[in-house]
Amino acid sequence: MENEKSTKFHLDRRNFMKKGSLIAGGLMAMPIISSANYFSGSDNVIKIALIGCGGRGTGAAGQALSTAQNVQLVAMADAFSDRLESSLANLKEALADKPGRINVGNNKFIGFDAYKQAIAMADVVILTTPPGFRPIHFEEAVRQGKHIFMEKPVATDPAGIKKVLDAAAIAKSKKLNVVVGLQRRYQNSYRELYKRFQDGIIGDMLAAQVWWNQGALWMKRRQANQTEMEYQMRNWYYFTWICGDHIVEQHIHNIDVGNWFMGETPDTALGMGGRAVRTGKEYGEIFDHHAVEYRYKNGVVMNSQCRHWKDAPSRVDEEIVGTKGRILCDRATIVDHKGKVLYQFDKSKENNPYQTEHDELFAAIAKNEYKFADAERGAEATLSAIIGRLSTYSGQVIHWDQALNSGLSIQPQRYAFDAPPPVLPLEDGSYAHAKPGITKYFS
């Protein structure tokens, strides 16, 4: 799109997959030997900083503070003071029975650079801002030698993916644990389904289908005296530079499951999408539906669809089809092609994967173990979703290597409330959006 800039780099598929080929759920535990990884302060308290104090950040912090370890929230950072104060109040209420786990005091930092100050005060950082900021926050947390939990997606453009991969390599060299919030990887039913898939219960993989179809989401209306940057920050879901569009921000979960079972990333994406229902100016520039055909090097095709349409059937699910049967992920069931149940996960043994992510991360940190290196896998899932978006926006076939090596960035020139965002409103207050067949990315 016309506001996107390019900085050149090169990384081929083979090197990317080498970096991303990790065992699901974590590395073999290794002792942490870097002095940068030992806890600061006394009594082995694991100090936590929260970067991004919205709903997901508040939830993630609450989960981190609910682990069995000796943990304490010592710093918070957000672009907006009201979000930070609301988050802090909600955490105090939710953890009223554990008051010693919140010790923020005056360590409340506001603004675009606030993350640097908060990160410096912690052993573990939780990165939960809107995803456009994830690459620079991850890069800084790694530079400062911190263990990391970061939400998906890890970027909104290929240039951000490159930044994450570069920082991930440094994190590995420093033995910093990194967990990415693709929580199906930490969910008991998915782990059991994958284990049986690996044992060959459905034979060779033939195809996959993934969905995130649901109704309408939240929206924030423009307020008086807001700069354009503040408005887009408040209404962030509807601007691609900061959100990535819902195929990247939300549907990434299902796409990641497809990649997990496939054992590789897509070679190409060809899709279609648009703004059929959600067309008002308050909905920025993103699409309300995407459908993508992902083709893999192994010849298998994954069909993907996601949409936000009110009063239409909802489905959030994945289906893996093999020569001998199929895996129905939401039902945690495996059947043969005649419908006979081959395996049924006992739903009474299901866990809360959002909590498990933190339980396993903090257990490893407390034991001084290097166990988790999710950043590359998070980058794989994110870029898979990004090439889907690039295809639905343009109507072009998008190749993985072409996108990865493009340097394509959709970020602002600078982050400040008086700075212009990458997309600005037209005279009528609406925003130009991608038009398949007209929007171009690569020649």
Image (cartoon, rainbow, N blue to C red):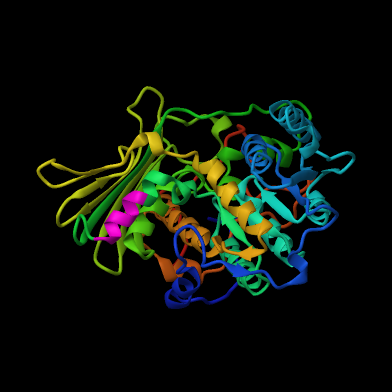
Q: Is residue 282 above or below residue 174?
A: above
Residue at coordinates 41% horizontally, 31% vertically from top-left?
A: 214
318 relative to 109 in the view: left or right? left
Residue at 58% from the left image edge and 43% from the top image edge: 239
Question: What residue sits 47% from the left and 28% below the top?
Answer: 216
> Which image quarter holds the C terminus?
bottom left
Residue 30 visible within the image? yes
Residue 296, image quadrant: bottom left
Q: Position of residue 150 (x, y in %)?
A: 62, 52
In this view, the residue in front, 110 or 263, is: 263
Tell me which corner region of the image, top left, top right, bottom left or bottom right, holds residue 298: bottom left
| Residue 286 counted in the magenta span | no
Determine if residue 434 is in view: no
| Relative side of 419 to 62, left or right | right
Specify the principal SS of the magenta part: helix
Asked whether 297 or 310 is in front, the reply is: 297
Residue located farthest toward the top when viewing the structure as drawn: 311
**Residue 284 percent coordinates (x, y):** 56, 37
Magenta-drawn stretch contains 198: yes
Taking the image as shown, residue 119 lies to the left or right of residue 138, namely right
Tell me: 270 left or right of 218: left
Displayed quadrant of residue 205: bottom left
Relative height, residue 152 to residue 36 (above, below) = above
Q: Is residue 145 above or below residue 286?
A: below
Q: Which residues are magenta?
A: 192-199
Determine the residue positioned at 40% across, 47% down. 254
Q: Nearer the viewer, residue 299 or 271?
A: 299
